[in-house]
Image (cartoon, rainbow, N blue to C red):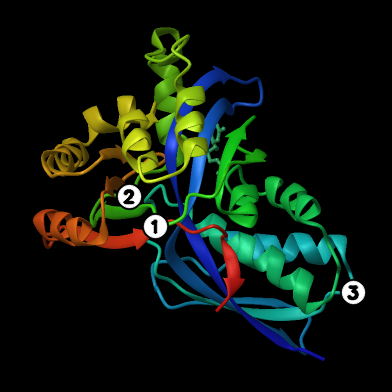
Amino acid sequence: MTSRISLKAAAKINLYLEITGSRVDGYHDLVMILQSIDLCDRVDIRKIGADEIQVLCTNPEVPCDRTNLAYKAAALMQDIYPEIGGMEIVIDKQIPMGAGLAGGSANAAAVFVGIDRLWDLGLTQSQLCDFAAQLGSDIPFCVFGGTALATGRGEVLSPLPDLTDLVLVICKPRQIEIATAWAYQTFRKQGLLATSQVKNQNLSSQIVAAIASGGDSAPNKIGRLLYNDLERVVLPEYPAIADLKNKLLDQECLGAMMSGSGSTVFAIAPDLDRAQQIAEAVRTDEIDVWVVKSLVRSIFDA
Ligand code: C5P
């Protein structure tokens, strides 16, 4: 019987993030387009004799206690399926934290998928996404993967046509980590919902159409339609992120935008050569840069 599994867990970017309402549960109603990208953590899960959950991570800054989303995912599954025994979860961290790339959510998604496979639970993707939604708004997408339209608080997912070979330059200011809750609460406190920049413009439908159009012109169309409401609170507070975005826009890219609540900013490049040139132009001691492609899935064998 298999006693271990090694999975890759992909980061995501937001090609679109519109806040459409505030909810009584304190969350916000969103319309998002989410995209898996080839910047992955590796998550190894091993059955152990003791009936406990141990989390280890290559990045010492990641808490490995009960607050870790991977730990929470394992604990939730043990509650629902008491036959699941103990496990050791080792996370090889490549996705930066506080980056708006859903690194922690990706790890939790890998734990849900990994436990299903290791203990042969036979769960459907929809069941895994329901469990995932109990722990965080981005985790269902991290199970789902590819390109998707997300509504509700981010957990209601519809697949969009695969975006293959979208070339991206991912830039993370090393010293800036942003708490997602702060970004949404500030958006609410500043009353920004009332001054929506895109309401009635049908912008989300336009970018969905651009994705569906496929072909060589799709990246160009998508690049012009990128949108993120959270830039309205994050960029004024963190001028370094605004500068980074402007620096990317000064390059020959097809569009640039902050991902999620930041601090990552990404650019869509016309091809890999241009992406490497853009990366060299913006990389400094303060800014980590990756050139990656879009992925059509999020959790897969390492
Ligand atoms: O669901 P998750 O724990 O990832 O969300 C982190 C925080 O982001 C929430 O506590 C909430 O403040 C904010 N949030 C929100 N509306 C959403 C998703 C997240 O206000 N749809």
- Closest to the observer: 80 or 125? 125
| Residue bearing mark 1 | 97
| Residue bearing mark 3 | 83
Query: Dot 1, how many residues are within 10 Å of its Cα: few (below 14), some (14-19), or many (20+)?
Result: many
* Residue 66 seen: no
* For residue 115, side relative to residue 99 (left or right): right
Q: How much space separates mark 3 and mark 1, taking CA atoms?
A: 33 Å
Q: How much space separates mark 2 and mark 1, taking CA atoms?
A: 7 Å
| Residue bearing mark 2 | 177
Q: Earlier in the sequence, mark 2 or mark 1?
A: 1
Element at label 1: loop
- Closest to the observer: 92 or 290? 290
Disc 2 + disc 1, Cβ < 8 Å = yes
The residue located at (27%, 46%) in the rendering is 267
Query: Dot 2, how many residues are within 10 Å of its Cα: few (below 14), some (14-19), or many (20+)?
Result: some
Where is residue 146 drawn, in percent x and y? 55, 52
The residue located at (66%, 39%) in the rendering is 158
Q: Is mark 3 within 8 Å of ligand 1?
A: no
Number of marks in the image?
A: 3
Q: Earlier in the sequence, mark 3 or mark 2?
A: 3
* Residue 188 seen: yes
Q: Earlier in the sequence, mark 3 or mark 1?
A: 3
Relative to 139, is 236 above or below?
Answer: above
Q: Amino acid at mark 1?
A: Met
